[in-house]
Image: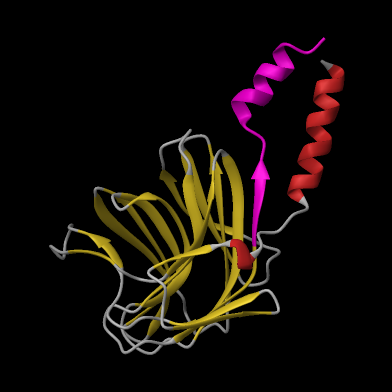
Amino acid sequence: MKKLLAGAALLLSLQTGMAQSLEKMQWFNEPEQWEIKDKTLSLFVTPQSDYWRISHYGFTVDDAPFYYATYGGEFEAKVKITGDYQARFDQAGIMIRIDHKNYIKAGIEFVDGKYNLSTVVTHNTSDWSVITLEKAVPYIWIKAVRRLDAVEIFYSFDDKNYTLMRNAWLQDNTPVQVGLMAACPDGKGFKATFEHFKVKHLPDQRRLEWLRKNAE
């Protein structure tokens, strides 16, 4: 059992040192203009596109660009986001998605001339929570941590000090698509840039507890 634990620790150290390769990810709703250069994804966001289901507005849309990879289990994902936001509801961030009825998107959103930290949680119907920023920011870091049946969303202005902005339920033991999302519901499109995207595997808490209880 001690050898098993040592081997698991070595594997974990190798996994946690790996960053997601952008070139190996795939598109859902591929935009017309995009490129990957110097480990950075830049795109011109598709006009009149978004993710939302039913509530408040009465419509459902599922047509904005989303660049993702599929992960099982528990993980931490983070990215640095920059956007040339122009119109109401221009947005960019991280999305964690099971299917068209179950997803979380979180990032920065431009509403009525102000920058907002924005999270939409959808389980058949969507909700929306915002934190309005006092002034414009050149970029934002967003981090999502999936643990068991919850996802914690954090923001940072320096990739050092992170603040919790939302804790949301998401079905555990289910593979999810994790990646980079941008939407432009009202406008004619804008440029969004994603840097330093990384997904770090986290060991399953239930399995670690079993290993501790059954260690020699």
Display colour scheme: secondary structure
Tell me residue 101's x, y (percent). 28, 49
Relative to residue 67, is residue 138 depicted above or below? below
**Which is nearer the eye, 144 or 203?**
203
Q: Quadrant of the N terminus?
A: top right
**Which is nearer the eye, 68 or 210?**
68
**Which is nearer the eye, 131 or 36?**
36
Tell me residue 131's x, y (percent). 42, 67
Relative to residue 96, is residue 81 depicted above or below? below
The residue lying at 41 percent from left, 42 percent from top is 170
Q: Quadrant of the C terminus?
A: top right
| The image quarter in which residue 132 lies | bottom left
Relative to residue 85, is residue 204 depicted above or below? above
Q: List the single residue furthest toward the left.
A: 58
The reply to whether residue 216 is visible in this rendering is: yes
Tell me residue 53's x, y (percent). 23, 58
The residue lying at 33 percent from left, 87 percent from top is 87
Q: Which residues are magenta?
A: 198-216
**Which is nearer the eye, 134 or 96?**
96
The reply to whether residue 109 is visible in this rendering is: no
